Image: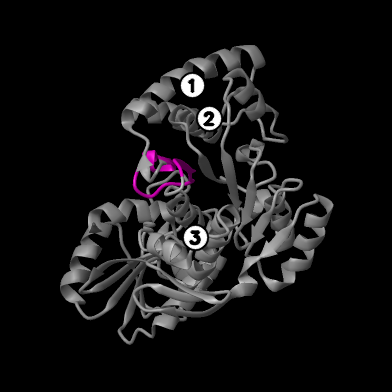
Amino acid sequence: MQEALDWLYSQKKSRPRTDLSRIRKCIELLKIQMPYDIVHIAGTNGKGSTAKTLETLLKVKGKTGLFISPYVLCFNERIQVNGKFISDEDVLNSVKRLKSFSFEYQKQYHDTIPFFELVFLMALLYFEQQKVRYAVIECGLGGRLDPTNVVSSTVSVITGIGLDHMNLLGNTKEEIAFHKMGIMKPDRPCFVCVEEELKPLFSKYASQVPTTISFVNDSVFDIRLKNATFFRFGKEAFHTPLEGIYQAYNTSLAIAVFRWFFPNESKRFIQKRLKEVTWPARFEKLKDHPLIYLDGAHNIQGMEALVESIKKKKIHAKIYVFFSALKDKDFGSMIQKLDEISSYYYFTSVEDSRKISPEVFAHSTRKPYEIVSDWEKVLCDFQKEHPKDVLLITGSLHFASQIRPYLK
């Protein structure tokens, strides 16, 4: 398995992606069929929890595939059917086939099939093999030129727009929105949760596609956090075990899409399924004494939502923040936002090719801090020495994926 993953991760782009011709050609050569309904999801934050919530609702109606990126628990988490991760055996069989195919493709077309496209092809092959009825597919990056945008989606979903991956997508929300809106398909509905100032841009673009667009956030009210997220969507009250103000909007998007497929399904049915939703490292409570939260927020929009959620909980204890981020992120803005709730920081680096020295993080705060190299010792000592305080671990999904197994 490790050899297979090492090979996958070693496959890099030989040239920048300017169109989707390579992934289209691969699907054609592999004779991949997609005879199922597809929900395609783009957005800066909230894609994963929206996708997981929708998958939880749909799988009761028929076998449902889920493709997400990145993962928190393990590689297999990227590809799921009815909530079960693809097995190691199926990954190995797919890699054997795709490795052989990749060599032949490279020989014939003088081009390398990169990691993400190979994993997406693996998902499509698996969904076809498993004969899924629905597939919920999350974009990897952007939308317009994301390899997943080759799908002929039944429904498109766009979650909140924020400033992330600016080196690839643009420096303003409008420029980034242009990439996300690229997943809209003619005469296929699109459900959206975006800020008020972006709605005219989305409406204009939708009319040109043309497609119908629904701004779901207009119907979300009365959000409350109490070990779950309670809210009203339209005239109905719901709650999700996923905690965070933003989860009210993500869950409402999933409900809206589900209701598009099944307009007569009862609120009772939907609420029963919502109780089953789990999604790691999204304002996830890992311990009670002391209270430890893990959140993979890795851009300013995600951090603003996290800080707002913490404030809404009205925590009276002292909040310590364990922070790490990758060098291509706006960690300065994230730390400045965290200053609104943080009393003390632990700064460390992530085990990743894009890691950065934690000393750099200290320049963005005036709060007391400590530079640490052994995060296991920090977690162990904190639980002994601060039983009545709160520890918030955030800044990177990569960091969250390394810490979560230890705490669980």
- Label for residue 121? 2
Q: Earlier in the sequence, mark 2 or mark 3?
A: 2
Name the residue beneath numbered marker 1: 98
Residue 149 is drawn in which quadrant?
A: top right
In x, y percent, where is residue 308? 49, 77
> Is 342 above or below relative to 156?
below
Asked if one can make out residue 172 in the rendered structure from this viewpoint, the answer is: no
Q: Earlier in the sequence, mark 1 or mark 2?
A: 1
Q: Which residues are magenta?
A: 62-80
Dots 3, 1 in contact, CB < 8 A: no
Q: Earlier in the sequence, mark 3 or mark 1?
A: 1
Give the farthest residue toward the front.
Answer: 264
Asked if one can make out residue 65 in the rendered structure from this viewpoint, the answer is: yes
| Front: mark 2 or 3 | 2
Name the residue beneath numbered marker 3: 298
Residue 186 in the figure: left or right of residue 269? right
Q: Amino acid at mark 1?
A: Leu
In what element is the residue under mark 3?
A: loop
Q: Quadrant of the C terminus?
A: bottom left
Q: Residues within 10 Å of mark 3 (few under 14, many from 20)?
A: many
Residue at 69% x, 53% y is: 189
Residue at 37% x, 27% y is: 90
> Is 127 above or below relative to 136?
above
Q: Amino acid at mark 2?
A: Leu
In x, y percent, where is residue 323? 39, 64
Residue 109 is drawn in which quadrant?
A: top right
* Cα–Cα gap, marks 3 and 1: 32 Å
